Image (spheres, helix red, strand yellow):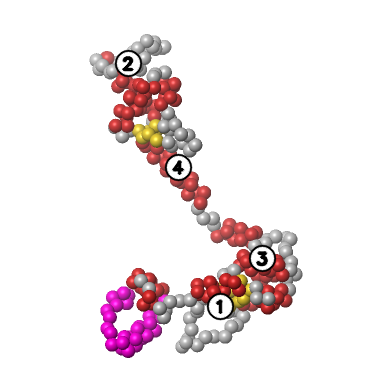
Amino acid sequence: MISTYNEASLNPKIEIPERLKEKSVSKEEALVEIIRSRLEALGPVTVDQISETLGVSSSEVDQALLKLEGEGFVFRGNFTPGFDELEWCERRLLARVNKYTLTKLRREIEPVSASDFMRFLFSWQGVSSDEKPEGVEALRGVLDQLEGFEAPAASWERDIFSSRIKNYDHTWMDTLCLSGSAVWGRFRTGNTNGGKKSSPIKTTPITIVKRTNLDIWKNIGKTPENNLEDLSHSVKKSFLILFPQKKHRFLKKLFRDQNASGQKRKLPWLNL
């Protein structure tokens, strides 16, 4: 301190130990150590702020900071959002600030619990509302929210529509279907026994979509079992792992096609 502030007087007076009196310290070296200790307790700070606090010139602070930067003790940059002036920050402290910032940002986007999400859905879809809409247009709005959702056939009118629309009338759904606005179907291919498709029953899961989006949902529901040769190596392996019951059917078709063409190909991706 005395090396930096030659004209300063200590009150109360501090006796310097004899072992330290023999060690000569220049003003520049002393200022480096003072700024080092200050930066360990401060966050991002500018040269002018350090200069004003310590009562030394900005050029002296710059020289000290450059020395500390050479040691890897401090980093320079723009760390404060919306603040364009160059700042300096101690390395470990900057790492802590960065860690806390990332933790805060992750907390802001972390997924909510399943119960909170369900409460949001009930509120957004009007299930928990005391005042529910009524009529064909209200039904159209409900279908817009639930497009692509799959539920047992019997539960659509009995549970889903009646809980979202006041005095639901099944003729409203008939009106939308007969007018061509909506269409229902089973777009996700299910397992079949011996190639036979079962007839729809009350528990059969169906989806209600806009007729204008029908082609989109049909394509989403398709499985590429008959077109595996057009897929990449990794996609083929993934498909046969996810649908092992289709592997035998595909191999049978593949070998039949090879025998017809007289070509033999090695398919290492089938060694699952």
Crowding at dot 1, Cα within 10 Å, few <14 / some 14-19 / many 20+, comes out as some
Give the spatial CA distance, label 4 vs label 3: 43 Å
Under tag 4, what secondary structure?
Answer: helix
Q: Position of residue 86 (x, y in %)?
A: 41, 32
Q: Quadrant of the N terminus?
A: top left
Q: Nearer the viewer, mark 3 or mark 2?
A: 3
Q: Earlier in the sequence, mark 1 or mark 3?
A: 3
What secondary structure characterizes most of the magenta part? helix
Under tag 3, what secondary structure?
Answer: helix
Residue 106 magenta: no
Q: Which residue is mark 4?
A: 100
Task: Give the residue at x 28% y 80%.
Answer: 265
Q: Nearer the viewer, mark 2 or mark 1?
A: 1
Task: Give the residue at x 50% y 49%.
Answer: 107
Q: Marks 1 and 4: in contact by CB < 8 Å?
A: no
Q: Which residue is mark 2?
A: 3
Crowding at dot 2, Cα within 10 Å, few <14 / some 14-19 / many 20+, comes out as some
User: Where is residue 36, by image quadrant?
Assistant: top left
Q: Position of residue 21 (x, y in %)?
A: 27, 14
Q: Which residue is mark 1?
A: 186
Q: Which residues are magenta?
A: 243-272
Q: How many marks?
A: 4
Disc 3 marks which amino acid?
Gly
Q: Nearer the viewer, mark 4 or mark 1?
A: 1
Q: Which residue is mark 3?
A: 141
Q: Marks 2 and 4: in contact by CB < 8 Å?
A: no
Compared across the picture, whether 251 is left or right of 24 comes to: right
Crowding at dot 3, Cα within 10 Å, few <14 / some 14-19 / many 20+, comes out as few
Give the spatial CA distance, label 2 vs label 1: 85 Å
Disc 1 marks which amino acid?
Arg
Q: Nearer the viewer, mark 4 or mark 3?
A: 3
